[in-house]
Image (cartoon, rainbow, N blue to C red):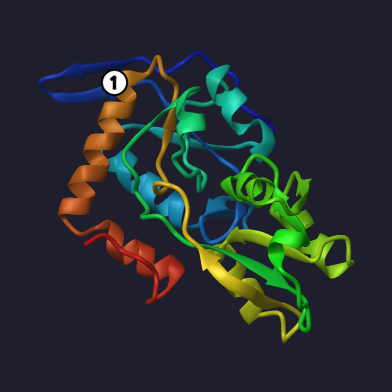
Amino acid sequence: MKKLILGAAILALTAGGVHAQTIRMGTEGAYPPYNFINDDGEVDGFERELGDALCERAQLTCEWVTNDWDSIIPNLVSGNYDTIIAGMSITDERDEVIDFTQPYLPPDPSAFMALPGTDIDVAEGVIAAQAGTIQASYIADIGATLVEFATPDETIAAVRNGEADAVMADKAYLEPIVAESGGEFVFLGDDVAMGDGIGMGIRESDAELRDTFDTMISEMKEENLINPMIVKWFGEDATIWE
């Protein structure tokens, strides 16, 4: 999909509300149920529903733009879109480059997935992960052999073809793969808690835009509008806001 390269959106806060140029919402479109491309070729998923609701509440006109994960932060910084809303965990390392809103999703556990019968200590195994993720950093930190791939699909293929012993990713992403695999894949070992929740990434120069979305997220949490979306897309057992 072509990436729209436009100037950064300029916000003017007035007594009558927020008036802005079109805000381009950057996402990956390849990480269900967070975000994916549906059969009509449109961005779909939890973050599409939430993002549209945030834009409507803020009286913003928003367009959706897809970008490969491995360049999603550089292309935000360079102005290819105005936000990242793509299952991105808030970390200190990323916060040095961009700003974040408060989290719109609580921290979700990560998990390991492997072929049935796999019996390894993950710290001694060959583990696949998507490049630039908190899972990739975790695997490197525990001393396992990390093999990185550009897309989530490639990490799954690496396990299937024996290139990796297991894959590590957000459990919410892996759960439907395990459930629909007909026994081809199983979870391995314990879940791992990490990260400070998932938030929207915003350029450091766009403080007003960050504050606008931050306020909208707060309002939607207070009105219990985000929790039903979480349950809809992630299931009854998903972690919700208290």
Where is residue 136? Give x, y as percent.
Answer: 66, 47
Query: Eyeballing the image, is 59 above or below 107?
Result: above
Residue in front for this viewpoint, 107 or 204: 107
- Which residue was labeled with disc 1? 208
Residue 190 position in % (x across, y down): 56, 71
Relative to 54, 218 lies left or right: left
| Horizontal side of residue 42 vs 116, given as left or right | left
| 115 is higher (above) or lower (below) than 123 | below
- Dividing the picture into quadrants, the one containing residue 124 is bottom right
Query: The N terminus lies in which quarter of the figure?
Result: top right
Residue 6 in sight: yes
The residue depicted at 70 percent of the width and 54 percent of the height is: 152
> Residue at the left extreme?
15
Query: Which residue occupies 47% across, 44% down?
Result: 89
Residue displayed at 34% across by 35% down: 101
Residue depicted at x 20% and y 18%: 13
Tell me the amino acid under the disc marked 1. Answer: Glu
Q: Quadrant of the C terminus?
A: bottom left
Q: Position of residue 130 (x, y in %)?
A: 69, 48
Q: Position of residue 141 (x, y in %)?
A: 64, 46
Q: Nearer the viewer, residue 60 or 34?
A: 34
